[in-house]
Amino acid sequence: MPRGRSTFTKRQKEQARQQKQRAKAERRSQRRLEGPDVSPQDELQELREHAEAQAAMFRVGPATAEAGSKGSTEKNEIDQ
């Protein structure tokens, strides 16, 4: 019995999908073998910059620490 056109199209589509999957797996394994492109120091610096941006957006972090230290300095001056 001959196969219909839709069966042929489905097989072609499935073969293309499997080929893409194999190529993707190959690229993934290559990246793992090559290692990260970014050094740990660069990544750490990038994380710090992101954290600073987030802190500035929510106004937390070093700005609140400075305010707290000023208050304790004023308290020490009053006690003396």
Image (cartoon, rainbow, N blue to C red):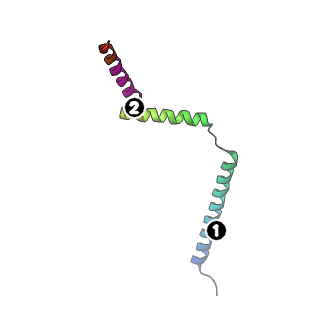
Q: Residue at x 37, y 22 (%)?
A: 69
Instruction: Tell whether label 1 touches label 2 (CB within 8 Å).
Output: no
Give left or right: position of 27 versus 78.
Answer: right
Q: Residue at x 59, y 68 (%)?
A: 13
Residue 3 at x, y percent in the picture: 62, 82
Instruction: Note whether 54 is above or below 27 in the view shown.
Output: above
**Tag of residue 56:** 2
Which one is closest to the eye, mark 2 or mark 1? 2
**Mark 1 nearby-residue class (10 Å; few <14, some 14–19, many ≥20):** few
Residue 71 in magenta?
A: yes
- Hey, what amino acid is under mark 2? Ala
Where are the magenta residues, as a range?
60-73
> Marks 2 and 1, how far apart in space?
51 Å
Secondary structure type for disc 1: helix
Q: Residue at x 38, y 23 (%)?
A: 66
- Hey, what amino acid is under mark 1? Gln
Instruction: Note whether 45 is above or below 35 in the view shown.
Output: above
Report the predominant secondary structure element of the magenta stretch: helix
Q: Residue at x 38, y 32 (%)?
A: 60
Give left or right: position of 75 versus 38.
Answer: left
The residue at which mark 1 appears reads as 15
Secondary structure type for disc 2: helix
Q: Which quarter shows the N terminus?
A: bottom right
Instruction: Note whether 59 is above or below 23 in the view shown.
Output: above
Give left or right: position of 30 versus 6.
Answer: right
Residue 46 at x, y percent in the picture: 53, 35
